Amino acid sequence: MNNLRYCSIFYLTLCILYNLTLRLSAADIFVNIPRVRNSKGKILASLYTSEKGFPSKPKYAYKTASNDIYKDSLKIIFEDINPGTYAVSIVHDENNNGKMDTTWFGMPEEGVGASNNPKMKFGPPSFKSASFDIQEASMTLQIELNYLKE
């Protein structure tokens, strides 16, 4: 019976150490958005681990976050992110309907942006152009919103 108790304590200790190791290697990503056209609606942010769904299908995102707009700039935080390659997309959801509105030919009607601030020429940015690696305890990104209709 004593051996069973020691095995249980040993197993519990291993589990605690494993969880601490995971938490110590996890990072936080702070996303600063320096200019928002107005205080209507929310900012929707999606964190992707691959090109699947990037940048406009948050159902494929690793994590999503949103924030109300109180001033002309704001911050989004993604917590407990494991080391790896990621890309962030953001939408200024001005009408608060929970999605990016587009014109009949697919152009965004609301402000959009992505990590690394890639140029948005004839379509959305690629995952590769917006991707970044995270290894350290925290990282800060600055993402500019692009409004096609000013």
Image (spheres, rainbow, N blue to C red):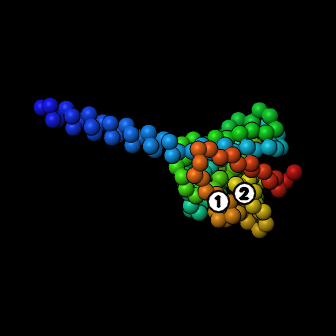
Amino acid bearing label 1: Ser
Residue at the farthest bottom position: 122
Judge whether residue 44 can be spotted in this image. Answer: no
Q: Determine the secondary structure under disc 1.
A: loop
Q: Position of residue 10 (x, y in %)?
A: 27, 37
Residue receiving disc 1: 131
Q: Earlier in the sequence, mark 1 or mark 2?
A: 2
Q: Are marks 1 and 2 in contact (CB under 8 Å)?
A: yes
Specify whether 15 is left or right of 148: left
Amino acid bearing label 2: Asn
> Could you tell me how far apart the alpha carbons at marks 1 and 2 are, in whole angstroms?
7 Å
Specify whether 50 is left or right of 9: right
**Residue located at (75% from left, 36% from top):** 69
Question: Residue 79's quadrant in the figure?
Answer: top right
**Residue located at (21% from left, 34% from top):** 6
Question: Residue 133's quadrant in the figure?
Answer: bottom right
Image vertical order of residue 88 relative to residue 138, above or below: below
Specify whether 70 is left or right of 11: right
Image vertical order of residue 106 relative to residue 134, above or below: below
Residue at the farthest left position: 1
Q: Determine the secondary structure under disc 2.
A: loop
Q: Along the line of sight, which residue is nearer the eye, 57 or 63?
A: 63
**Residue located at (79% from left, 39% from top):** 73
Q: Along the line of sight, which residue is nearer the eye, 110 or 11?
A: 11
Q: Along the line of sight, which residue is nearer the eye, 112 or 1?
A: 1
**Residue located at (54% from left, 52% from top):** 83
- For mark 1, does the 10 Å Cα neighbourhood hold few (<14), some (14 to 19), or many (20 or more) residues? many
Residue receiving disc 2: 116
